[in-house]
Image (spheres, rainbow, N blue to C red):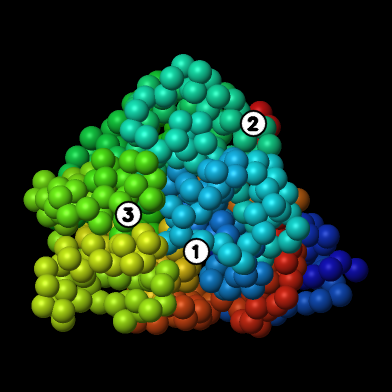
């Protein structure tokens, strides 16, 4: 007898084809048999040690989160219900050019401080790795869901060049190329950048092109958070398309949104740019989250010149009155490059989390609201918060446009990514709600996508980008990374008011054939492992 049979499921197999009724048999972590209803009518139905009655439920491949910030959360919290309960069976880490490998002791400390707002400082983590392979080996000790890793270009630059705004020397560029090659050989699936974050933003296009040549030669892909999502956003997208075509490297555009007032209604222009490149032979995919607000750190809004040198230099500039005045002018008048070239609107900046619990009363309010309560200018509130919280503050930016969100998610190159920061008292609900929101709100309620289309966006398309030969489809021989959900009730529980509520309508999730969600509850199983680059 086999391990498990899922009976009478409506199979949406990830290919985009119409659903069909079937019994699906699983053994030793793989799908060994799919018996369609018509075939089963005249023969004995498969038997197994365990049977699940899936009447009324959809069986699909597990969802792939193409943009996750769970780099430490997977190590810190074995439960990881934030993603497992959504039906996510694979996350892609190392995003936005900053993560924890490859590093030396100095760089690790600098990176930990720079992205405390994303992942916490990590006092509860034993950082017993320094290489990409070492980090992947650490994941292999057992995690809730599977994880792939992108080499973070900003971390590589910090390791080799430091946090200064200057071009890399030829010797430094050679060393960065070697580090990228080593990371790919150790299993990374590609390279990420954060081109509005230091120090990655200091890299010129020629430097990025040379790194992308290495990535392309190994069969990986480049995933940039590009230089602007506000003023000049289309030019920034075009820059990444041209750069990767020159480097002969596949491109995956991170959280491919068109935000701020200057881009209202301009998604068709972005999609026309991408269609033209695709028709000319470019290899491009993208991911988005199904919400309008963005999420980052408050420090990320600062101009690049103010961020040069790393966290201690930033804090020194903020405490100097004259330099702080220059920063304020760039933020409020000129339009900081950290704020995508758009003058900051403090009423759109909501504090979502703080590193210092003593500052918790600010969470849930915009910077302007907090400033009004104190009777001071918003910049004074923001500056004080940055210094007291030592740059650990996270924010929501309410700058998106629903028409752009809907247009982009329909595109043939689209995949799903939560961009979910799990830290903070009031995180963005996308961390806990992205995938059920696609299925409930945009499929069932609005009909923006059909169910079959949406599942393909969340499963087979990202699996193809990751070059995974046995994931992303319900097929015989494929790994049993699967989700069973009720298409009539699936919905996110997370809201902006209660962002950590778990979704409804997803009673079963399997990773490698083992239940991580069973009868709607998290089990204690830790079947997840690193998913490493498939060699060419």
Mark 3 near mark 2, Cβ–Cβ under 8 Å? no
Q: Nearer the viewer, mark 1 or mark 2?
A: 1
Mark identifier at residue 120? 1
For residue 257, above or below residue 284 = below
Task: Work out whether mark 3 precedes mark 2 in sequence or the reverse, and give the earlier one.
Answer: 2
In this figure, which residue is indicated by the disc labeled 2?
182
Q: Is residue 491 left or right of residue 467?
A: left
Task: Work out whether mark 1 precedes mark 2 in sequence or the reverse, and give the earlier one.
Answer: 1
Please name whichever residue, 40 or 153, is drawn nearer the observer in this view of the structure: 153
In this figure, which residue is indicated by the disc labeled 3?
315
Disc 3, SS: helix
Mark identifier at residue 86? none
For residue 498, above or below residue 346 = below
Residue with the most extreme right position: 1
State how far apart marks 3 and 2 are (Cα): 34 Å
Mark 1 near mark 3, Cβ–Cβ under 8 Å? no
Task: Work out whether mark 1 precedes mark 3 in sequence or the reverse, and give the earlier one.
Answer: 1
Disc 2, SS: helix
Q: Residues within 10 Å of mark 1 (few under 14, many from 20)?
A: many
User: Residue 493 at x, y = what percent?
Assistant: 44, 80
Please name whichever residue, 451 or 512, is drawn nearer the observer in this view of the structure: 512
Q: Nearer the viewer, mark 1 or mark 3?
A: 3
Which of the 4 image quadrants contains residue 523?
bottom right
């Amino acid at each position: 007898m086999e391990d498990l049979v899922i009976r009478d499921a409506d199979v949406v197999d990830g290919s985009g084809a119409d659903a069909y009724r079937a019994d699906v048999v699983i053994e030793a972590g793989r799908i060994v048999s799919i018996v369609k209803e018509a075939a089963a009518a005249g023969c004995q139905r498969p038997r197994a040690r365990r049977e699940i009655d899936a009447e009324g439920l959809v069986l699909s491949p597990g969802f792939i989160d193409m943009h996750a910030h769970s780099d430490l959360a997977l190590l810190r919290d074995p439960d990881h219900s934030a993603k497992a309960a959504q039906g996510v069976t694979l996350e892609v880490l190392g995003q936005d050019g900053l993560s924890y490998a490859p590093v030396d002791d100095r760089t690790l400390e600098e990176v930990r401080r720079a992205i405390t707002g994303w992942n916490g400082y990590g006092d509860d983590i034993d950082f017993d790795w320094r290489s990409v392979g070492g980090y992947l080996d650490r994941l292999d000790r057992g995690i809730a869901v599977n994880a792939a890793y992108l080499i973070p270009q900003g971390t590589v630059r910090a390791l080799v060049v430091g946090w200064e705004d200057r071009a890399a020397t030829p010797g430094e560029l050679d060393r960065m190329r070697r580090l990228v090659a080593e990371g790919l050989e150790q299993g990374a699936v590609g390279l990420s950048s954060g081109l509005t974050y230091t120090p990655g933003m200091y890299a010129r296009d020629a430097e990025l092109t040379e790194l992308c040549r290495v990535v392309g030669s190994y069969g990986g892909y480049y995933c940039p958070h590009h230089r602007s999502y506000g003023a000049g956003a289309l030019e920034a997208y075009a820059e990444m398309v041209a750069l990767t075509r020159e480097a002969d490297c596949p491109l995956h555009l991170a959280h491919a949104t068109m935000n701020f007032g200057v881009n209202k209604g301009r998604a068709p222009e972005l999609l026309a740019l991408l269609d033209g490149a695709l028709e000319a032979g470019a290899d491009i995919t993208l991911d988005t989250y199904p919400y309008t607000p963005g999420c980052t750190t408050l420090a990320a809004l600062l101009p690049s010149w103010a961020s040069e040198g790393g966290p201690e230099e930033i804090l020194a500039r903020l405490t100097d009155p004259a330099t702080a005045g220059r920063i304020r002018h760039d933020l409020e008048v000129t339009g900081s490059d950290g704020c995508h070239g758009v003058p900051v609107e403090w009423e759109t900046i909501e504090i979502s989390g703080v590193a210092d619990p003593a500052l918790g009363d600010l969470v849930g309010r915009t910077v302007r609201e907090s400033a009004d309560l104190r009777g001071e200018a918003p910049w004074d509130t923001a500056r004080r918060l940055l210094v007291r919280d030592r740059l650990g503050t996270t924010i929501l930016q309410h700058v998106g446009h629903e028409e752009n969100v809907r247009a982009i998610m329909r595109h043939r190159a689209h995949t799903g990514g939560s961009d979910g920061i799990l830290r903070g008292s009031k995180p963005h609900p996308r961390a806990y709600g992205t995938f059920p929101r696609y299925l409930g709100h945009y499929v069932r309620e609005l009909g923006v996508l059909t169910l079959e289309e949406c599942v393909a966006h969340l499963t087979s398309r990202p699996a193809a980008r990751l070059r995974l030969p046995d994931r992303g489809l319900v097929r015989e021989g494929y790994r049993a990374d699967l989700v069973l959900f009720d298409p009539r009730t699936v919905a996110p529980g997370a809201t902006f008011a209660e962002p950590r509520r778990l979704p409804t309508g997803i009673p079963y999730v399997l990773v490698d054939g083992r239940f991580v969600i069973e009868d709607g509850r998290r089990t204690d199983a830790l079947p997840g492992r690193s998913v490493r680059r498939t060699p060419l």
